[in-house]
Image (cartoon, coloured by chain):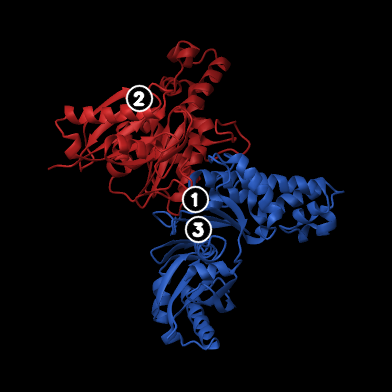
Chain colours: A red, B blue
Amino acid sequence: MKKYRIGIDLGGTNIAAGIVDENYKIIKKASVPTNIPRPPEAIVADMVALAQRLSESAGISFKDEVESIGVGSPGIILNGVVLQAGNLRFKNVPLADMISKASEKQVTLKNDGNAAAYGEFIAGCGKGKHSLVAITLGTGVGGGIIINGNIIDGCGGSGGEVGHVVVKAGGRKCVCGNRGCLEAYCSATALKKDTVKAMKKNPDSMLWQVAKNIDSVSGRTAFDAMRLGDTAAKKLVDSYIDYLATGVASLINLFQPEVVCIGGGIGNEKETLTVPLSERVSEFSCSFDGNITSVVTATLGNDAGIIGAV
Amino acid sequence: MKKYRIGIDLGGTNIAAGIVDENYKIIKKASVPTNIPRPPEAIVADMVALAQRLSESAGISFKDEVESIGVGSPGIILNGVVLQAGNLRFKNVPLADMISKASEKQVTLKNDGNAAAYGEFIAGCGKGKHSLVAITLGTGVGGGIIINGNIIDGCGGSGGEVGHVVVKAGGRKCVCGNRGCLEAYCSATALKKDTVKAMKKNPDSMLWQVAKNIDSVSGRTAFDAMRLGDTAAKKLVDSYIDYLATGVASLINLFQPEVVCIGGGIGNEKETLTVPLSERVSEFSCSFDGNITSVVTATLGNDAGIIGAV
C-alpha cells in the first residue's frame, strides 16, 4: 500500500493542505479560510477535517494510507508548541499534540518560514544542494536557513529570522521593536511606503501612470514604472536592491550557503531582481572566489510551505 | 597507554602548540615565531619540530602517544587546503597533507577563528551547551559559529565570518572591500582610530591623561578614560557597544545560540563590556522571551585555538 503524507500550511488568511507523495510532489490540494481570531481548538478541528476531506477526494484512505501530517505555522515554535504567534493570537499552544490527538496521526510542527525554506531545499531551487537560505519578500520579510539539511531555528525556536538581520544600525523602526532590520527596508510594505513617498515628491513620475492613485500602489509599482523608463522608479528599485544586497551579503558571510532563494511577492520580479542583486552581492560579500553562492528565484511558490511541512 | 592530541594555532606572529588530554586540558604548551613571509614548507617543518620537541619535554612519545594533530590557521580553509590566507601569503596550500606527511600523524585543519570558537564551545564558556557564537574583538573581528556541535563554515569554507556582518549599509569601508561591516566599527583597530579622532576633537579629555600621546592609544584607552569619568570616552564606548549590539542582535536573530562569547583584546574588558552589551542586545533582538541567549566573556583566551584545533 502506498503511503502519503499531508502538509498543512496554516496561514493568517487560509489553511492550505496538500497530499504529498514520496517524491515531494503535491498530488492534490485544498484550502479553507482560517477565520481568525478563533480558539486553537476550532482551527485544529478545521485542519483535521480539511486533511480528511482532501484524502477522500483523492481516493486515499486517511486512516490507512496517510502516514503523518506536517504543519507549518506562523510564530515561534519549540518542540511542537506555538510559543507565540501574533496574528493567530496563539500563546503556548501545543499545536502538534492537539492535531495528533484529533487526527490519530504523527504530527511534526515547524515555523512556516522554515517549512517553506525546507520545501525549496528539498524539492525546489535547492534540490540536490546541501545548504540554502530562503528570503521571502512579502508583507514582512521571512525565510529560513537550511545547513547540511538541518533547519537553523535557534535554541528557543526564534532563530532563522532573516528579516531581522540589521542592515542599518539606528535606521528605520521595525515592527519587531528594533531599528534598521532588513524587513524595515525590503518588505513589500516598505517598498510601497517608499513608492508613495517618491510619488509625492515626483508629481511627473511615471509611477503615477502605473498606480493611478496612491491607494493602488503595490510592491510591483516601482518595478513596472522602471520598465517604462522612469528615473524616480529606477532610483527606488536601486535603493531597494542595495539594502537587500546588504542583507544577503551578511547572510553569505555567515552561512555561505550554496543557494540564496528569493521568494514572496517581490520575488515574482524574478531576474529583474536577482540579476542586479547578484551583482551587488558579489561586490558586497567577502567570499574568496566570488559567487560560489547563487542567488535565484524560488520555484515552488506557495507549495513550498506544504511540501516543506511534511 | 594514554593517548594525547596536539593542537597547533598557526598565527601571523607565533606558532603556538599544546598537548591536550582527553578532558580538553592543555598539559604543556610552547611557541615559536612564525617569521612570515616564508614558504609553507619551512613553516610546516617548524610546526612539526615544535610538536615533537613539546612531546619530548612533556615526557610523551611523539611516535606512540600522540594520536593526531589539529591545526587552526588563518584564512579560508576547505578540505584541509588553505585556499587563501592574506597575512601568511598562502594560496591553495594543502597544509593538512603537508603536516600529515611530515609528522606521520592524522591532521585536521580548521580556520583559526572556528577552532577557537570550538575550543570555547567544548571546554570554555560554551561547555555543556549545544550552540555558541564566538566574536573575537582584536586587530580585526573574527569568530566562529557552532550549532548543534557543528561548525558553520559554509560550502566554500568562508562562512562564519561574524566580523563581516554588515551593521551599517553604505557605512565605513572595511578591509574586506565591503562597507559597514562589524569589523569596521568594532575591531580594536577601529576603536583606536575613533579614540584618536575623539582626542583631537577634545583636547581637555582625560583620554590624553590615559594615553599620553596619540601613538600609545590602544583598545583600552577609551575604557580606561571612561572609568576615570571622562565624557568623551563614555561616548566612544557607548557608540562602540551600540554597533557591537547591532551585530550581536543580527547574530541572535539568525542563530539564537545559547551563548554569545566575546573574546580578543577588547573582550578583556569583561563585564564592563558584556553587561551594557547584553542590555542593548535584549532591546535589539526580536527573540520571544528576552535573553535566552547569554552574552559572556570568553574564558580560555589564547588556549581556545589550541584546544579547538584538536
Labels 3 and 1 in the same subunit: no
Comparing B187 with A127, the one in front is: A127
What kind of element bears circle 1? loop
Real-space Cα distance between discs 1 and 2?
A: 41 Å
Labels 2 and 3 in the same subunit: no
What kind of element bears circle 2? strand
Q: Earlier in the sequence, mark 1 or mark 2?
A: 2
Q: Is residue B124 above or below residue B104?
A: above
What kind of element bears circle 3? loop
Q: Position of residue A114 (x, y in %)?
A: 39, 40
Comparing A275 with B187, the one in front is: B187
Q: Chain of mark 3?
A: B
- Residue, far right: B204
Real-space Cα distance between discs 3 and 1?
A: 30 Å
**Amino acid type of disc 2?**
Asn
Say whether marks 2 and 3 touch (CB < 8 Å): no
- Residue, far top: A212
Labels 1 and 2 in the same subunit: yes
- Residue, far front: A101
Q: Is residue A300 visible?
A: no
Please identify the quarter of the rendering in which residue B242 is found. Answer: top right
Left or right, A125 with reference to B177: left
Q: Is residue A303 visible?
A: yes
Q: Is residue A110 above or below residue A195?
A: below
- Residue, far left: A1
**Amino acid type of disc 1?**
Cys
**Which residue in the structure is indicated by mark 3?**
B129
Say whether marks 3 and 1 touch (CB < 8 Å): no
Residue in view at x 77 percent, y 61 percent: B216
Q: Which mark is residue A286?
A: 1
**Which residue in the structure is indicated by mark 2?**
A14
